[in-house]
Image (tube, rainbow, N blue to C red):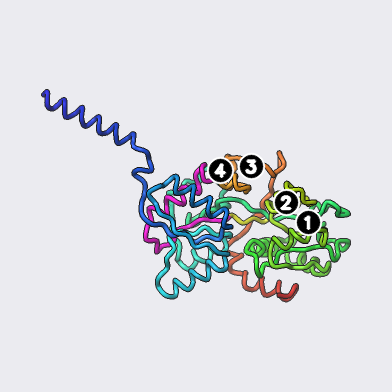
Amino acid sequence: MKYLSRGILLAAALACTLAAVPAHAQAPKGKLVLYTSQPERDATQTTTAFKQAYPGIEVEVFRSGTTEVMGKLAAEFAAGAPKADVLLIADAASMEALKKDGRLLAYPQAKVAGFASGTYDADRTYFGSKLITTGIAINTAAKSRPASWADLAKPENKGQIAMPSPLYSGAAAIMLGTMTARADLGWSFFEKLKADEAVAVRGNGAVLTAVASGEKPYGVLVDFMAFNAKAKGSPIDFIFPAEGVPAVTEPVAMLKTTQNPAAARAFIDFILSDEGQKLALSMGYIPAKASVGSPSWLPPGTVIKLMPTDIGNVVQNNGANLKRFAELFGN
């Protein structure tokens, strides 16, 4: 009985010791290949924070624009040798296309409590990490402040508007697909912008430059770029239009062909965790999980009205939408 009791005590002590081991000591290990379209600064901060949370995982990163990332993936799929385990790219439309092709691995156990339903795929194959909305930027010297998209497209703004082209910008393609599907905007809105001689430039950066310099008093622009520029002294304001704003969510997903599914799930867990969401907040973005807070640039009490986006519909109609846009505004 004495030896039995001693054995029980040893077993109990071992159990307590194991329970006290840090979670990451039993966490997934090995190599994780991440393909991302995040800006370099964001990608570095993301991988650094992830490796701190999971020190047993080595992260290899390929970083480029969404178009280049998708092109690299397509070439690897064609060769039968996809290398990425996990993706973190700008827009859900690209993820939806991969899902449609059967390339994504669902993660039903992902912890999405606190995330709005529209920020992640209902089948849980991809998950939004943040909200990047598109609204109206104005130069502070502009003669008027449009309160809505309809106001922006009024004839008095002729020759004064810049916007990102969906032929180059993923966020602009989401915007185009979202707005043209609405009864209150539709293609009529873009036809009015064309009549106003709005110019479509290669990206949001060019819109910011045009508005901040006063070259164009009004611009269609992503939120954080306008607010960050304003914080640095640029003569620019941002308006959330009355009809609402389209948004991209910079989703994360894992491929079915992942060589390290445990590490891929860990990466998704990190992005969706409070720690990961606070990281997005510290980078100056609106986190997808509202409970972790709002960026300092967002005026207190701001209520953001998101336009619902049918991503499947956007993907299905994207080719036709881009063709029609190019016919209106040119390449």
Quadrant showing the C terminus: bottom right
Please tell me which residue lies in front, 112 or 273.
Answer: 273
- Residue 22 colored in magenta in the image: no
Residue at mark 2 to residue at mark 4: CA–CA distance? 22 Å
Q: Check disc 3 and report its element: helix, strand or loop.
A: loop
Q: Nearer the viewer, mark 2 or mark 3?
A: 2
Which stretch appears magenta? 250-277
Residue at mark 3 to residue at mark 1: CA–CA distance? 24 Å
Choose the circle earlier in sequence order: 4 or 3.
4
State the image coordinates of residue 290 (x, y, percent, origin top left): 60, 43
Choose the circle earlier in sequence order: 2 or 4.
2
Q: Which residue is mark 2?
A: 229
Q: Check disc 1 and report its element: helix, strand or loop.
A: helix
Three-letter code, disc 3: Ser
State the image coordinates of residue 277 (x, y, percent, origin top left): 55, 45
Q: Is residue 277 left or right of residue 135?
A: left
Choose the circle earlier in sequence order: 1 or 2.
1
Q: Which residue is mark 4?
A: 278
